[in-house]
Image (tube, grey):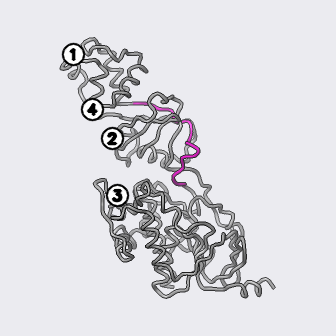
Amino acid sequence: MEQESISKRKCNSIAIIGAGPAGCVCAYYLLKAGYDVSIFDGGKFLRTLLPTGGGRCNLAHAEFDFKELAKNYPRGEKFLYSVFSKFSTSDTLAFFDEIGVKTYTQDDNRIFPISNSSEDVKTKILKSIQNATFIKEKVEQIEKLTNGYKLKTNKSIYAFDIVVVAIGGHSKFEIFNPLNINIITPTQALVGLTTKENFAEISGVSLKNVTALGFKNIKSDDILFTHRGITGPLIYKISSLKARDEFPYKLSLKLVENFDLQDELNKNSQKEIKNLLGQYVPKSFAIWLLEDLQINPETPCHKINGNTRNQIMNKLQNFEITITGKVPDGEVVTCGGVDLKEVNPKTLENKQHKNLYFCGEVLDIDGFCVGFNLQNCWSTGYIVAQSIINK
């Protein structure tokens, strides 16, 4: 009786669950190949795209070697080799050019639309998939049928031959319960960190080109002190790499490049030490650091002895912070999701259940900021579409 009821409701070939970046690009290539596609989403379509790049939409990152690109994913690096070798950054730019989105690359290699508008990108993507059937319902459960899958939504029941899951990393994974799919419990990544040290006095102060000691593949980047702790691009990367580490843990930061402080003291003997250090770090931070070391910021440089000099340099070259947790409302992206061991990296099809595919952040894949997480969406969305087309 239930099977009969389902078939009367709707039975199409392909359902995509989730109208985010991955689901939409997957729909684009399936529609282009002539497939009948239904897209389910209980919220606004492409809503996760709007905040990216501060509303300017950081579409991708100008790294065109697929192995180098994959290094920017703390979880999923090797898995993505096959994916990125088939759909690279160049292919992403070709896709956007095809739908009428012209792009440019900043000096920091971040790629944006010329319009500098996430809303513009959203409009053009949705226009490119306007022939899809949009079903504004929330899928609550996926069940296996003899041939195909049953989708239970908050309003109805449907059946499809092929199901693509692109629900993102913030979703409730209970929809997989009937399928016995292993889920790596999601947790925050790319997030600000709370500290044992109190930085309230320098909240809002930023330091440029800071190096995290003890990390091999992180380039120097900026940090920002907050009333809760510390944030900024460098901290986001660290929080991602250590997303599952237990608290507390210590970080050591090199705040400035090596310089001869004694030589500078000799050259500027009458200058106050706060003003000398202010040439290397913001003066407000220099004052805070000196006071933390119980050094009078107005001390003339010629009165700074060897021991005091070493204390200052040690603080600048090996600035230790105790991390106590994550900022609870500061989450940018999650790590976790569908266990990659259950997914064929060449097709993104589930190994247990045929014709069930995954793309985007629903997978246990996450990258750093500056366009890497969207690249994951564009590439995996394409791979799923091609896998279905080539069956």
Task: Name which residue type carries label 2.
Answer: Asn
What separation in Å lies between label 2 and label 4 (alpha carbons)? 13 Å
Residue 8 location, quadrant: bottom right
Residue on which the image places disc 1: 269
Please name the residue shown 68% across and 70% down the image: 179
Instruction: Please report whichever mark, 4 or 3, sits nearer to the chain's N-terminal start.
Output: 3
Residue on which the image places disc 4: 258
Task: Name which residue type carries label 4.
Answer: Asn
What separation in Å lies between label 2 and label 1 (alpha carbons)? 28 Å
User: Could you say whether the residue bearing mark 1 is in a helix, strand or loop?
Assistant: loop
Mark 2 Cα-neighbour bin, 10 Å: few <14, some 14–19, many ≥20: some
**Left or right relative to 4: residue 231:** left
Residue on which the image places disc 3: 110
What separation in Å lies between label 2 and label 3 (alpha carbons)? 17 Å
Whether residues under marks 3 and 1 lie with C-beta atoms below 8 angstroms apart, the answer is no
Question: Is residue 331 one of those drawn in magenta?
Answer: yes
Task: Name which residue type carries label 1.
Answer: Ser
User: Could you say whether the residue bearing mark 2 is in a helix, strand or loop?
Assistant: strand
Q: Nearer the viewer, mark 4 or mark 3?
A: 3
Q: Can you give x and y, in whole percent of width and height, for residue 209 in the image?
A: 33, 41
Instruction: Please report whichever mark, 3 or 1, sits nearer to the chain's N-terminal start.
Output: 3
In the rendered image, the quadrant that contains the N terminus is: bottom right
Q: Magenta region: which residues? A: 319-334
Instruction: Please report whichever mark, 4 or 1, sits nearer to the chain's N-terminal start.
Output: 4
Looking at this view, name the residue that lies furthest to the left.
Answer: 267
Looking at this view, name the residue that lies furthest to the top.
Answer: 303
Residue on which the image places disc 2: 209
Residue 145 location, quadrant: bottom right
Instruction: Please report whichever mark, 2 or 3, sits nearer to the chain's N-terminal start.
Output: 3
Look at the picture and state if 204 lies above or below 291: below
